Image (cartoon, rainbow, N blue to C red):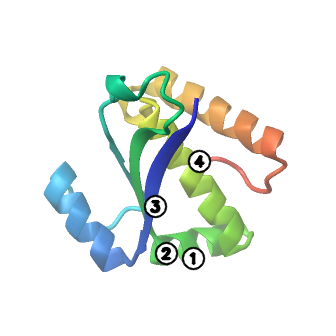
Amino acid sequence: GLVEGGVTLTSDEGIAALNAEWRGKQGPTDVLSFPCAPMAFLAGTGEPQPVGDLVVSLDAARRQAAERGHGLRDELRVLLLHGALHLEGRDHELGEAEEAQMAEEEEAYMAQLGWVGKGL
């Protein structure tokens, strides 16, 4: 079915404030995911199901693009895909097996989409 979500581009300063507020972690990160609960009343209506929002630090994306040797556009794709997998419930921070599974999924999606780069 159809899904929808929001994407906010911000600075390291902006994402650091959100990281502290919502995760209790100090400092910036590259992408934050804010999933929302499924809305059962939308099922079968043809209306898009909201999945949540992503916040990406453009500062971090620029740094990581330079470190990885590809462009900002490619890094933003990696970060959006990574965040989308988090919205689906994937979490690489749960352990090595989960991290390996998420990395495999990122690489598979990137290959299907013909995108340059490697997942996080």
Q: Is residue 57 depicted above or below 117 in this figure?
A: below
Which residue position is annotated with label 2?
58
Image disc number at residue 81: 4
Q: Which residue is mark 1?
A: 62
Total tally of numbered discs in the picture: 4
Q: Which one is in front in this view, the residue at disc 4 or the one at disc 1?
A: 4
> Which mark is first along the chain, 1 or 4?
1
The answer to whether the residues at label 1 and label 3 have Cβ atoms under 8 Å apart is no
Q: Which residue occupies the foreground of this view, 27 or 108?
A: 108
Earlier in the chain: of badge 3 and badge 4, it is 3
Asked if residue 98 lies left or right of residue 36, the reply is right
- In the rendered image of this protein, does residue 76 appear above or below residue 38? below
Report the residue at 66% width, 73% height from top. Answer: 72
Q: Residues within 10 Å of mark 1 (few under 14, many from 20)?
A: some
* Disc nearer the start of the sequence (2/3): 3
| Residue position marked by numbered label 3 in the rendering | 7
Residue 18, percent from left and from top = 23, 63
Cβ atoms under marks 2 and 1 closer than 8 Å: yes
Cα gap from disc 2 to disc 4, whole angstroms:
15 Å
Question: Which amino acid type is marked by label 2?
Answer: Leu
Q: CA distance from mark 2 to mark 3?
A: 12 Å
